[in-house]
Image: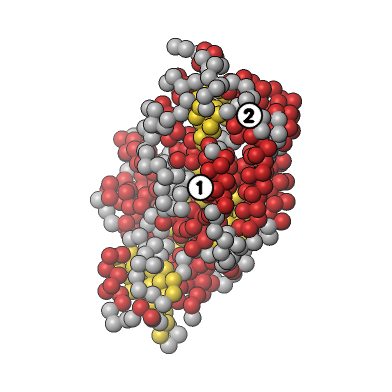
Amino acid sequence: MKSIQNYKLTVNNWCLVQKKIAITALVPPELIFACRGEPFDVNNIIPGSKKYPRNKLCAWTAIWQEMLSKREIDIDFLIVVAGGDCHNALVDGQKVAMSGIPTHFFFYPFDGDPDYLESQLYKLSDFLGNVGSPEKPGQIRELKKLGQKIDKKRADGKISAGDAFRIMISFSDLMGDLDKFKKVISSTEERKIDMGNRVALIGVPPIFHDFHDVAQALGLAVVFDELPFEFIRHSGNDIPGIARDYCNYTFARPLDFRIKFLQEELEKRKVDGVIHYTQFACHHMLEDEIMRLKLDYPMLTIQGDLPGNTPEQIKLRLEAFRELLERS
Amino acid sequence: MIGLDVGSTTAKKVSIEDGEIKYKITGTHNWKDLVTGIGGNEIISTGYFRNSVPHRASVTEITAAIYGVRHYFPDADVIVDIGGQDTKIIDVKKNNFTINDKCSAGTGAFLEFVANYFKIELKEMGSFHSRAKRIPAINNTCGVFALSEMISQLVAGYTREEVIAGMHYAFARRISFMIPEAQKLVLIGGTVKNKGMLSALENILQKEVLVPDEPQIVNALGALKYYC
């Protein structure tokens, strides 16, 4: 069997042709575009998937693993976030690598060391064929400013939570095409939103494709999405700059760092309550009791497993949570 | 005006006439029998099917439980509603709730499996429990594996009564893990009519557990009280 290292050696001469680069979690898209790659976040197709993976813990990783290994997603290379994401991804990423897709394993520093992250970014740049379009990070920075405006308008009740979420979550790969993505952002419709109860959604994003719209219809306006907010808040014009900013990616850092950041954001956004989404068989489930202890807000914990519509049992919890907030 | 609780296994109707609580209970799919001659405008609904039946207003079982229990125990601080398909833990003082519907081991369905296995009625389980001389340890937290363990205990020589008592303890232990510290703990739902399960839970928690006279109708009553 070929080693992962061997796969890496096969990919260094492709840099003149744009290749589709799958990512399993946040990998600075600035660097992928700068290396003339077209990023593709494999998670973005999972909420709409009807796949029942054969061997699973967390459905997110199990589904992309199976689809990539069976070549049901058309990609050229894979970057697995192996440090700062989960061990399921680390193992499922190796399964994909063994199926023959050239794969690179990327590690965020737990202690936020920018020098370590810089060395990781240089290794990634080597894997991707090195920087060929140095202007791309600057263009992405401008798009992220638009993303931050969308986020603010959503919190101000001018854009629906569902529309804002769909834009913000797409900042992990910017749809692989900066011009196309800019047009999509520009087409976002503004309208007055009945805000009702202001809630923050923390944890991994829900695996249900209609979650934000369902919550809105049940009187819960999501004014903060933890992970998508990370997608729009980091940037950098070159590798040292990207390293200095992305080393504060909260999901890769210790819990106290992440919680302090959350406390500030939740206060800023004047939330009435917090929804903690957890995924079945995901290590983030273990964080729930700490979140409940440290975040001083009414909190609803929900758990999802397979993708699809928001299940009725979750709707019951959302409706009961709205009633709870109205009693508070 | 009536409160109508259409849950996963039973439907309950409550009205208050001259200050007296009147109620009727039937199977979920016979709920129409409860509302003959009553217009939707006179119904406050709750339960899983709350939005599938005609209603003037609807409210979730969590809020209905709070209002219903308040009628019997105004200072209850934790409510445990053990339904056929899920268990809801409501921390009234902290305004918080959790619902277990992923694991059958803490729901009425678990005890129904046991009763079906022994070909006895659910309501007989309490008297079987009271005749047990020993309590076998059933350690599995998974409902399906607990049933396998139950059969192993029968093979090992425990009586039907003792194994049923052991299953009540396994069930009660599972529920106890979900219950926060409480001064006044109230149990509601059809399952809590089972005296064996109740005594197992009191033994595990080492405290008295309060149960309304008719624990199955509390949510229907609460829906009515919530609106009126």
Residue at position x 69%, y 22% in the image: A119
- Residue A110 visible in rendering: no
Residue at image position (42%, 30%) is: A74
| Residue A217 seen in this snapshot | yes
Name the residue tied to disc 1. Answer: A206
Q: Position of residue A201 (x, y in %)?
A: 58, 51
Looking at the rendered image, the quarter that the N terminus of chain B falls into is bottom left
**Colour treatment of the image:** secondary structure
> Left of B151 or right of it: where is A282?
right
Secondary structure of residue under mark 1: loop
Relative to B32, is B79 on the left or the right? right
Q: CA distance from mark 1 to mark 2?
A: 34 Å
At x 42% / y 21%, what residue is drawn? A99
Instruction: Return the mark for residue A133.
Output: 2
| Residue type highlighted by circle 2 | Ser
Q: Is residue A322 above or below residue A302?
A: below
| Residue nearest the viewer, comparing A47 with B217 | A47
Residue B28: where, in percent of width, then height?
Answer: 31, 64
Circle nearer the N terminus (1, 2): 2
Q: Is residue A257 left or right of residue B82?
A: right
State the image quarter where residue A105 is shown. top right
Seen in the picture, residue A295 relative to A134 is either above or below; the reply is below
Query: Which chain is home to disc 2?
Result: A
From the image, state whether disc 1 or disc 2 is nearer to you. 2
Q: Residue at x 39, y 67 (%)?
A: B50
Residue A257's disc is none
Badge 2 element:
loop
